[in-house]
Image (spheres, rainbow, N blue to C red):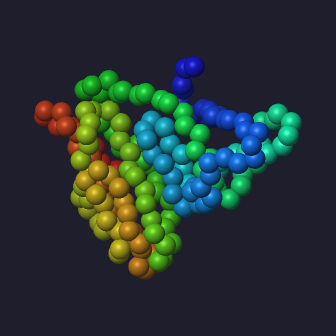
Amino acid sequence: MPITANNLFVASYQTSVGHFSLDQGYFTTFGVENPPLNASADTSGHANEFVHIQRQPGIPANTLNASNYWVDAVFNYKPTPGSPLSVRTAFLPNGTQSVEYHQRLAAAGGDTPYHWSLISGALPTGLTLSASGNITGTPTASGTRSFTVRVADSSKPSQTATQP
């Protein structure tokens, strides 16, 4: 099946034994970025976990506790080597003071692996940015912060891209 941008794809399974793999609350505050695919946190206004729990077949249309049902879709994406590097993460979900935060920044193009760095501003106190693009930690204060990140690819010479 061809995959095209900005389209919804449904992966589903049916069971007759009355149970299934489930992590309740998985998408409550954290999304999953695996460019070019993403599954945003429910806080973004886009739910990921549609379910249909009935004896009769039907289309999943309801959500339940921001849960992840662990249906795996296999998707192989290889950007064209040498294509322009860009930052794919356009926004980050808000964090909550004293609640663990994890968000992975996403890039596309260039040659992997990527190396991320903070080039201006500051992350909220309690959060750090790893070289692999993970923003993690527990915010210790409320408020808004502005910062700019840079991603560099592994081509020679390397390409860079920034995102405020």
Which residue, as the protein is rendered here, is positioned at the far left?
157
The residue under the point 66% across, 47% down is 20
In the picture, the quarter occupied by the N terminus is: top right
Question: In front: 4, or 90?
Answer: 4
Which residue, as the protein is rendered here, is positioned at the far front?
17
In this view, 74 is above or below 26:
above
- Asked where in the image residue 160 lies, by quadrant, the reply is top left
Is 98 on the left or on the right of 116, as rendered?
A: right
Question: In front: 111, or 27?
Answer: 27
- Number of labelled discs? 0
Is 99 on the left or on the right of 49, as rendered?
A: left
Question: In front: 141, or 20?
Answer: 20
Which residue, as the protein is rendered here, is positioned at the far top?
1
How far from the left and from the top, in percent, is residue 114? 26, 43
Q: Visible in this render: residue 43? A: no
The residue under the point 35% across, 74% down is 126
The residue under the point 67% across, 35% down is 12
- Asked where in the image residue 24 lies, by quadrant, the reply is bottom right
How far from the left and from the top, in percent, is residue 156? 13, 33
Q: Visible in this render: residue 93? A: yes
The residue under the point 29% across, 27% down is 83
In the picture, the quarter occupied by the C terminus is: bottom left
- Asked where in the image residue 130 lies, by quadrant, the reply is bottom left
How far from the left and from the top, in percent, is residue 3? 54, 25
